[in-house]
Image: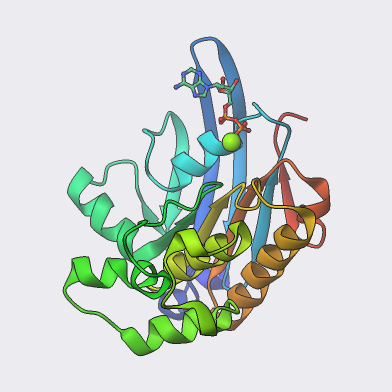
Amino acid sequence: MPSLRRGLWQYAFWVILRLENLGFSYPEAELFQGVNLELDRGDAFAVLGPSGSGKTTLIHLVAGLLRLQTGEVFWEERPIRDMPEERLASERLRFLGLVFQHHYLFAELTALENVMVSGYLAGKVERKWAEELVARVGLEAKGMLMPKALSGGERQRVALARALYPRPKLLVADEPTGSLDRKNAERVMSLMLELTRELGNALLLATHDEHLAAGLQILRLGA
Ligand code: ADP
Ligand code: MG
């Protein structure tokens, strides 16, 4: 069916992420087949399934970190299958922010410097924006601290601010609260949802936790 989004208004309204008939197998096992998904601005989707169901594999396909088998991944309607590696890498920086279970912060940089780190690499640092993000994740008073002086939940909030710093269209999080207690997990989760709404990006979250996925749209794996 023709869609208005892909018609006249495509430049204003194109879909952020589209998965078309995505399938993936390892030699030992088929993980999933025929996955279809569309994420627009403000959409929050949970990839929900038990450990081993293929959530991380799906996330890596979406991020262009793993070679596609069947189907296609579209970043703002651009198919990524045949994108040259270099272009994929540069588009990824602009398009996508990643948060993992482990924070991967640089131990020798402050929280604020960790948030701005991609700015240093790009040769353009937006300190005000980084400070805004640090404040927005509730760490206004702690931007000058090193990661070792922060709690697990605080480190993960720094990792979230860092992922959002380049203003990605899509925030992708793979078990981002997997190392946190319930209270901190819920705080990180609600921040991700609030910021997705405020910044107008989309969220794709992989989790095994039904409770965390409550209120999100759900793509179930391993059912
Ligand atoms: P989840 O994130 O849901 O726990 P994964 O995507 O990490 O699932 O893994 C899904 C399945 O694929 C698991 O059974 C895992 O052992 C298998 N798997 C993951 N990576 C590889 C690999 N590189 N080679 C073979 N099998 C793999
Ligand atoms: Mg996983």
Task: Give the percent coordinates (x, y) of residue 109.
Answer: 33, 65
Count every numbered label the image shows and give the total.
0
The residue lying at 55 percent from left, 78 percent from top is 139
The residue lying at 50 percent from left, 17 percent from top is 26
Q: Quadrant of the C terminus?
A: top right
Q: Quadrant of the N terminus?
A: bottom right
- 88, 127: nearer the viewer: 127
Task: Give the percent coordinates (x, y) of residue 15.
Answer: 51, 66
Q: Is residue 78 above or below residue 206?
A: below
Identify the residue at the far top of this view: 28
Q: Is residue 171 visible?
A: yes
Q: Quadrant of residue 64?
A: top left
Identify the residue at the far front of this view: 149
Task: Give the percent coordinates (x, y) of residue 216.
Answer: 75, 60
Q: Is residue 1 visible?
A: no
Task: Give the percent coordinates (x, y) of residue 80.
Answer: 34, 47
**In this image, 156 relative to 130: left or right?**
right
The residue lying at 47 percent from left, 86 percent from top is 132
The residue lying at 58 percent from left, 66 percent from top is 154
